[in-house]
Image (cartoon, helix red, strand yellow):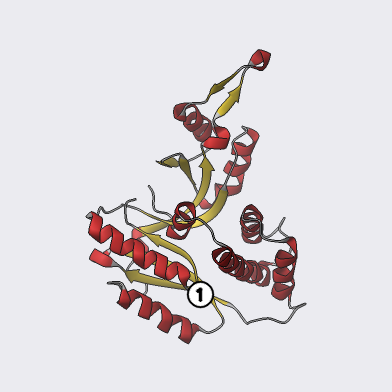
Amino acid sequence: MSGHSHAKTILHKKQITDQKRGKIFSKLARQISVAVKEKGKDPETNSALRLVIEKAKSMNMPKDNIERAIKRGTGALEGEKLEEVIYEAYGPNSIAIIIEGITDNKNRALGEIKQILSQHQGKLAGSGSVKWMFERKGVITADREPNKVASLPQGKQRTESKEELELKVIEAGAEDIYWQDDILDIYTKPEELEKVKKNLQEKGIKVESASLDWVAKSLVNLEEKNKQAAEKLFEALDESETVQNIYSNLKD
């Protein structure tokens, strides 16, 4: 498995400029407000809110921004009337794509997404025509680098191998794993995401992110020029204020 969220892949690959960081904070604020509106402002009982707040903190989003987004979600502060949207689409060479977004104007958002797709060899698909190719999974990301050094007696240290890290992850309850260079994607059942994450942390594994994603049941390979066209589409979608996450069945 791989390719769970191309928005996350873009973040890993790109240097985050101040302008880009501001756009990320704006998107995270929307996620926080929607999560609060749907299931309340207590992260202990609202797992979606807890996940997005953790993500916001990992991106160094200021505490004041997080608190304002929570207040907008509760109605204590005035703000946009936000709704979640989901689009199914085909990209270059008919790769399957799921786009999750948040908007205050569904008609405007739909027009924008259609335009981006048409400019990058893509098109909108009917409801259900793409989603069946994916399944909902908990996805935890761990970077090997902070988990590289294992302590030994007498203050000695050695490098922990990928195999040793994989064994810990499997013992923690992972369903599947996938390496992208030194980044390890850990897959779980949706309802076991929090439990596996906690198990990993108890084993001393530093978790970079945790989320519920759409994961492709099978992946497709493209020639390099077609893969580059797909990456341009993902980047264009990621630039949209509406788009929160992009999933596809393209093999990395």
Q: Is residue 19 left or right of residue 10?
A: right
| Numbered disc 1: secondary structure | loop
Determine the image quadrant of residue 77.
Answer: bottom right
Q: Residue furthest right?
A: 76
The residue that appears at 70% across and 64% down in the rendered structure is: 66
Q: In this view, does 195 lie to the left or right of 184?
A: right
Residue at image position (47%, 41%) is 184
Seen from the viewer's position, the closer of residues 38 and 154 is: 154
Amino acid type, residue under disc 1 in the picture: Thr
Q: In this view, does 39 lie above or below 155?
A: below
Q: Where is residue 168 in the image (x, y as percent from the top left)?
A: 53, 31
Residue 124 visible to an observer of this rendering: no
Q: Can you say whether 210 is above or below 21 in the image?
A: above
In the picture, measured across the screen, residue 100 lies left or right of residue 227, that is: right
Q: Where is residue 109 in the image (x, y as percent from the top left)?
A: 47, 81
Percent x, y of residue 152: 62, 18
Between residue 200 and residue 221, name the one nearer to us. Answer: 221
Residue in the image at 60% along x and 67% along y: 22
Q: Quadrant of residue 61?
A: bottom right
Q: In this view, does 180 lie to the left or right of 28?
A: left
At 60% from the left and 78% from the top, the residue drawn is: 82
Residue 59, image x and y in percent?
Answer: 61, 56
Q: Can residue 47 be seen in this view?
A: yes
Which residue in the structure is indicated by mark 1? 242
Count of numbered labels shown in the rendering: 1
Residue extending furthest toward the top:
154
Tell me the crowding category of disc 1: few under 14, some 14 to 19, or many 20 or more residues within 10 angstroms, Cα based: many
